[in-house]
Image (tube, rainbow, N blue to C red):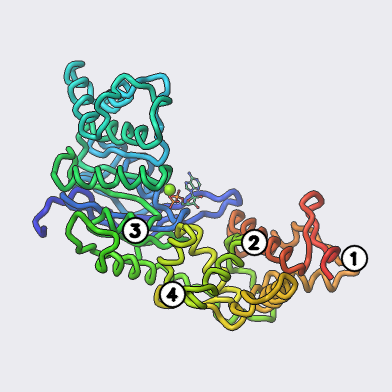
Amino acid sequence: MGAATTLLEIHDVRRTFPKPGGDELLVLDGVNLTLHEGEIVGLLGRSGSGKSTLLRLIAGLAKPQGGNLTYLGQSIDGPASGVAMVFQSFALFPWLTVLENVQLGLEALHLPEKEIRTRALEAIDLIGLDGYESAYPRELSGGMRQRVGFARALVVHPNILLMDEPFSALDVLTAENLRTDLIDLWSEKKLPIKGIILVTHNIEEAVQMCDRVLLFSSNPGRITSDIKIDIPRPRERTSTAFEDYVDRIYVEMTARRVERQPRQAPVTGPNLDTPLTHVSSGLIAGLIEAVAAPPYNGKADLPDIASDLQLEIDELFPVTEALQLLRLGDVEGGDIKLTHMGKRFADADTNERKEIFSRALMSCVPLAAHIRRVLDERANHAAPRRRFIDELEDHMTEEAAEQTLRAVISWARFAELFSYDKETEMFSLENPT
Ligand code: ADP
Ligand code: MG
């Protein structure tokens, strides 16, 4: 493999976006990546970590502020004809037939009409759409429509196929069928492409499809691990080797998150610089109950509990982080374990749960304690939202500040620590005891 052609080289790429206030949002920082001929490389990260942004840079649809990208040794400067993309949404033209939609992929190449037709029919055949040439998108199932999306990308015989969460809008079985078909075609060397970059937030999908998986961190997006998946194809999801990789990735992705959690939240001073992700108290309670119950009895393997509760990492990681923040659970070595308080919460009735939650908020979430203190100190026990948003925005983006406040409002409502009126945008101690 050492001598394989380098299709794509990304060096020290940095990308920012302007924020409304004039600051910059750093989305990608120090990103390095190499794609060799014959490889499927996965980019695995949570939503918002900058994966689509990186794909757009590779596709030549946007430019980095720093670093460089080369495709076959040439600096990427606008869309290259050898790079094609498949998106999550099907993006088909409803007024065109399957054949016409696929032919569109070739428009830019200015080929003779006959060749356009031949190549489009080949791609349709290859991807399992034979017989549907004259159907319209509305007559097709979601899975078939995504096959048209693939055919439209394959028809140009691209050197690099970029896929941005191409299976995530499909139901489980349809997605699995399409993945298997693609991998089979790839293994049999029937696809007219040389390398693939697959963006996903699904750990199992990454292990199933990729030769290497790059883990992407958030804020800013950075590649934190490059994991070679050394399992021959076809890969069995239930094999020990497969499960070991899945476990290892869970461990790496959660370990890094834990490091960034403030272990000892200071009880003095507001310390409002940690953005929170909004997770409903119902989901928090649901996860605690599931971990407390058999067969887990207080400690669960994250991949197991994720599959039991059908949670994707975009849901699972925020809720496990909320558990850690509130010191109701701990994550270590890919397991989630309830703390003493977490177990008490699981056994408690609604009123006791509210009490436990309220105490957790006061001692572990400085912003919640801060808002409560301000309300306690004011004669009318009320304060406008603006006051806290302004404080938060000194330390984080507007978006993060909104999210953080939303999280605290919903947790405080469940805990009856304070209340918030959306209409008047006022915090108060009205309803809580
Ligand atoms: P992912 O694909 O991993 O979910 P994205 O690349 O779509 O992540 O987005 C990463 C971050 O960049 C997000 O915070 C998003 O809001 C921001 N972002 C993406 N595109 C733009 C843009 N055109 N202008 C401003 N911010 C953007
Ligand atoms: Mg995306």
N-terminal label among 2 and 4: 4
From the image, tell me which residue sits under label 4. Answer: 335
Give the residue pinned by disc 1.
380
Please, what is the three-letter code of the amino acid marked with disc 4? Asp
Rounded to the nearest whole Å, what is the CA distance between mark 2 and mark 4?
Answer: 24 Å
Mark 1–mark 4 Cα distance, whole angstroms, equals 46 Å
Label 3 close to label 4 by CB (< 8 Å): no
Q: Residues within 10 Å of mark 3 (few under 14, many from 20)?
A: some
Q: CA distance from mark 3 to mark 4?
A: 17 Å
State the SS at label 4. strand
Query: Circle 2 — which element?
Result: helix
* Residue labelled with disc 2: 407
Front residue of this view, candidates 109 and 324: 324
Q: Earlier in the sequence, mark 1 or mark 2?
A: 1
The spot of residue 228 in percent (x, y) is: 23, 63
Image depth: mark 1 or mark 3 in front: 3
